[in-house]
Amino acid sequence: MTTTATRPDDGRSRAAIAAKTLRTDRWWLPPLITFLGLAAWVTYATVRVFMHKWYYVDDYHYLTPFYSPCLTDRCVEGSAEFGTPLPSFWLIPEAAFTLPFLLLFRLTCYYYRKAYYRAFWLSPPACAVPDAHQKYTGETRFPLIFQNIHRYAFYAAGIISLINTWDAVRSFHSPGGFGFGLGNIILVANVVMLWAYTLSCHSCRHIVGGRLKHFSKHPLRYRFWLLVSKLNARHMMLAWITLGTLALTDFYIMALEAGWFSDLRFVG
């Protein structure tokens, strides 16, 4: 016999389901993979940021994005393009001015919100699966109200991408003159992916064409809006790709400076 419960609004009845979810697929797998992936990247990045070594290859002017721009007086010679205004203290990373803004851009990103809300907070862990929290106030209270500054973090991310672009260009002009190696390819590829991810941001799409009423009167902005819209459709993919290119770039430069292997040179 089926137990029923009466709905007071229209008088109809429905089955009283005791199970938390009727999903029989592996709904828990995507949030688990996301949790493991993000946790591994955060662990690696945290360790690298506070190692304070193996971040700059002077022979080829390779500077890892995790340490760019290098701003403490602990920076090795040649790595500080913009001076060293910060003191050398273990808790102060070399890129102390840029890392908070970079982290803020990622944390407030619309995709990453979905990713860590589901994977870390289980809020909710998947579609048609109950939230692990009894109350939900949205992004209207502390600390989640700060998610609303994502549009401003986008501008900071643009500046950081410009700095990384400068590092990639600078790496072609090593102390020995013009040079080109595998490290250059990795640095340039990372910068291209960072720009693609930054420009695919929902805030960027809104800034480009969100307030336009007549695209025909703004043909250049319309074309850029179309480009950004295509990138925006791949925002999740670009978010993960850039985590990979950042880690790969850092690891390659660390390995070169640590002497684990040599850079594959094509010119110079």
Image: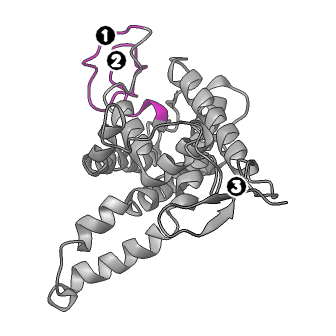
Q: Which structural element holds mark 2?
A: loop
The one nearer the camera, 24 or 190, is 24
Q: Is residue 25 left or right of residue 145?
A: right
Q: Residue at x 41, y 63 (%)?
A: 200
Q: Which quadrant of the structure image shows residue 47?
A: top right
- Magenta span: predominant SS is loop
Q: Residue at x 36, y 80 (%)?
A: 226
Give percent across and percent down for residue 60.
51, 38
Numbered marks: total: 3
Q: Which structural element holds mark 3?
A: loop
Residue of label 1: 87
Q: Is residue 30 left or right of residue 103?
A: right
Q: Which quadrant of the structure image shows residue 95?
A: top left
Question: Sequence order check: which comes first, mark 3 or mark 1?
Answer: 3
Residue of label 3: 16
Give percent across and percent down for residue 54.
57, 24
Examine the rendered structure and indicate whether residue 27 appears above or below residue 217: above
Q: CA distance from mark 3 to mark 1?
A: 64 Å
- Give the amino acid type for the residue marked by disc 2 in the picture: Thr
Question: Sequence order check: which comes first, mark 3 or mark 2?
Answer: 3
